[in-house]
Amino acid sequence: MRRCLLDTAVFVYALGRDHPYREPCRWIVDALGDERIAGEASVSMVQEFAHVRRRRGGDVGRASKEARVVSGLCLLHAFEEPDLTLMLELLAAYERLDGQDAVFAATALNRAIDVIVSPDPAFDDVPGLERIDPLDTARIEELALA
């Protein structure tokens, strides 16, 4: 299986309202649960997910419970000083990356993960990181077959 880092949006869309990304993201979450995809993430992704779910739903307990489930679907990586250093370099170099995106890119690059699953085209700017859009079902399915 090919390693991939997951963006928060995959989980947010999977649990969200009707949207073109909803079903593809649900497929990804199911594949993570069945261990057909080897998903990895920054612990910051889980924090961002919990924040978004609480803000949108208002239920702290539910957001916390969902975040625990999400954290169990991925191999989690701590955000460490080398990640901070690279995150700041990426943030300065690539205008489309916001702070959280730069955290995710640094986490991936520092751990030799060359794929990120995300609907966010800002990751396309980062050398050494290939973005796979959840709508690209053929490429997503390749992650499961690799």
Image (tube, rainbow, N blue to C red):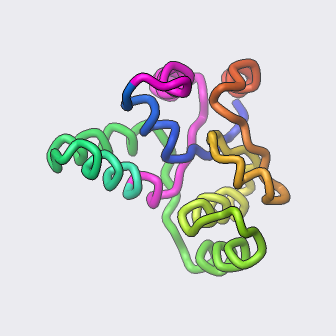
- How many labels were placed on the picture? 0
Q: Is residue 35 left or right of residue 133?
A: left
**Which residue is at the front of the view, 114 or 120?**
120
Q: In x, y percent, where is residue 28?
A: 54, 26
Magenta stretch in the rendered image: 18-46
Q: Is residue 144 left or right of residue 27?
A: right
Q: In x, y percent, where is residue 9?
A: 50, 42
Residue at screen point 51% across, 56% down: 42
Q: In x, y percent, where is residue 25?
A: 52, 27
Residue at screen point 56% across, 22% down: 24
Residue at screen point 45% across, 60% down: 44
Quadrant of the rendering where the N terminus is positioned = top right
Residue at screen point 64% across, 73% down: 87
**Which residue is at the front of the view, 39 or 91?**
91
Taking the magenta stretch, the answer to whether it contains residue 128 is no
Q: Is residue 142 left or right of residue 97?
A: right
138 w.r.t. 114: above or below: above
89 w.r.t. 6: above or below: below
Taking the magenta stretch, the answer to whether it contains residue 40 is yes
Q: In x, y percent, where is residue 110?
A: 70, 64
Quadrant of the rendering where the C terminus is positioned = top right
Residue that protrudes farthest toward the right in the picture: 127
Image quarter of residue 40: top right
